[in-house]
Image (cartoon, rainbow, N blue to C red):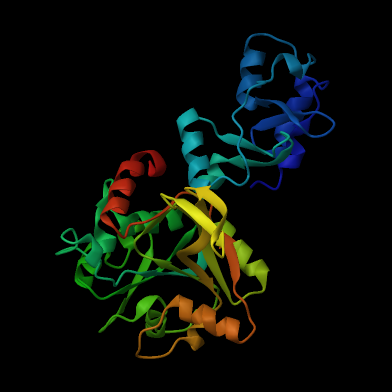
């Protein structure tokens, strides 16, 4: 988000000349017209002013006659990829960020979104599983390489991380791992750096970390290679770095509806009858952020999971932080999940 956006603010009583001065100050090619509470009333771009001048109109007129009172806006919580897609679709180069009361809280530009700063954090993707529940689809293809939309699941994951500037990947593999290496190589084709952790036997979601050639210096991601999500990975990393926890576990709400009337009793008497109740639980979403020290907790040469690591931290009175995911998320583990992801892909990821 631009640091100069505050310089673009003007009031509805200001002139076109004042708007032009604000555009010059902010160097963002836009002025935001706000009220005394900084609620957005409209916007005016340098293109609007250029057209205004070309028509022979004066610069001392009120900006309220020129501004666009229905600009495209967004919430600061929206995923970066969604914001970029919206700007492309509407052919706009600036996007005001507003809260629930329409108060301006920031301004994004297309140039900023397209030039995501490269981040140093490693992304470890777990892609060694056999995917037995998806047979026969996985008979000759590792599950993370199944095609959903026009690309393998693993490629979509990598591209999502790249949207947020994360470009360093280590992929753990076992079952049909050569298929993964053949497709991704060293990552140059995807403007990424990709290395591989080769498991001689399945090591689980944590065990593969013992194969890292060196301990990361920065906090790093661990993610299952069969997930599709629109999670804002920058927000997740920022949350972790401010949590003071060694591990952050992403959670997702899961609902289960019992298809019967559930009876509550006391002795031989009915006390309550609940028709088809729905139970909500937060479940493990298979995405983590780890401090480098987590690598030291992983046993060598045997299988272990991130759940084991979380339990070790709990036993040592170092509870992991939790990060709820409200964005799109699907674990492509069963045929029904595969069908759902395939149906969703075009509207969610394109």
Based on the displayed image, in which of its 4 quarters is residue 125 positioned? bottom left
User: For the point 63% across and 22% down, which residue is it?
Assistant: 70
Can you name the residue that lies furthest to the bottom here? Answer: 300
Residue at horizontal 42%, vertical 78%?
Answer: 305
Q: Position of residue 144 (x, y in %)?
A: 29, 62
- 259 horizontally vs 90: left or right: left
Residue 231's place in the image compared with 218, above or below, is above
Q: Residue furthest top?
A: 56
Residue closest to the eye, 125 or 24: 125
Q: Nearer the viewer, residue 205 or 195?
A: 205
Name the residue rendered at 48%, 46% in the picture: 81
Left-right relation of 97 to 306:
right
Please provide percent x and percent y for residue 203. 33, 81
Q: Is residue 258 above or below residue 98?
A: below
User: In this rendering, does residue 116 appear at all?
Assistant: no
Report the residue that reaches farthest toward the front: 268
Residue 70, above or below 197: above
Q: Is residue 223 left or right of residue 24?
A: left
Say which quarter of the image contains residue 298.
bottom left
Q: Looking at the picture, how far across and down is residue 213, in whole percent?
A: 39, 84
Q: In this rendering, would 164 be left or right of 135?
A: right
């Amino acid at each position: 988000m631009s640091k100069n956006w505050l310089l673009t603010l003007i009031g509805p009583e200001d002139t076109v000349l004042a708007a032009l001065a604000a555009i010059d100050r902010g160097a963002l090619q836009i002025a935001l017209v706000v009220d005394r509470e900084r609620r957005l009333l409209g916007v005016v771009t340098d293109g609007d002013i250029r057209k205004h001048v070309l028509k022979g109109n004066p610069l001392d007129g009120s900006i309220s006659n020129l501004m666009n009172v229905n600009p495209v806006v967004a919430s600061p919580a929206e995923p970066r990829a969604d914001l970029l897609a919206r700007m492309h679709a509407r052919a706009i180069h600036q996007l005001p960020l507003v809260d629930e009361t329409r108060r301006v809280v920031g301004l994004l530009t297309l140039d900023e979104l397209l030039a995501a700063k490269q981040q140093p954090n490693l992304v470890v993707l777990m892609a060694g599983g056999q995917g037995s529940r998806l047979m026969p689809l996985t008979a000759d293809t590792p599950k993370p390489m199944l095609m959903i939309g026009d690309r393998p699941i693993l490629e979509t994951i990598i591209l999502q991380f790249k949207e947020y500037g994360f470009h360093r990947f280590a992929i753990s593999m076992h079952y049909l791992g050569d298929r993964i290496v053949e497709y991704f190589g060293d990552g140059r084709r995807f403007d990424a750096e990709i290395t591989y952790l080769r498991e001689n036997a399945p090591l689980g979601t944590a065990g593969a970390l013992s194969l890292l050639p060196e301990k990361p210096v920065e906090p790093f991601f661990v993610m299952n290679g069969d997930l599709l999500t629109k999670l804002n990975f920058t927000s997740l990393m920022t949350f972790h770095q401010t949590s003071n926890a060694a591990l952050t576990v992403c959670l997702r709400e899961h609902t289960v509806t019992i298809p019967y009337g559930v009876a509550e009793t006391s002795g031989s008497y009915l006390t309550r009858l609940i028709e088809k109740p729905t139970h909500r639980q937060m479940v493990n979403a298979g995405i983590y952020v780890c401090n480098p020290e987590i690598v030291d907790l992983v046993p060598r040469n045997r299988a272990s999971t991130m759940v084991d690591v979380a339990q070790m931290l709990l036993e040592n009175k170092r509870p992991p932080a939790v990060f709820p995911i409200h964005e799109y998320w699907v674990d492509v583990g069963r045929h029904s999940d595969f069908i759902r992801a395939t149906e969703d892909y075009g509207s969610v990821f394109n």
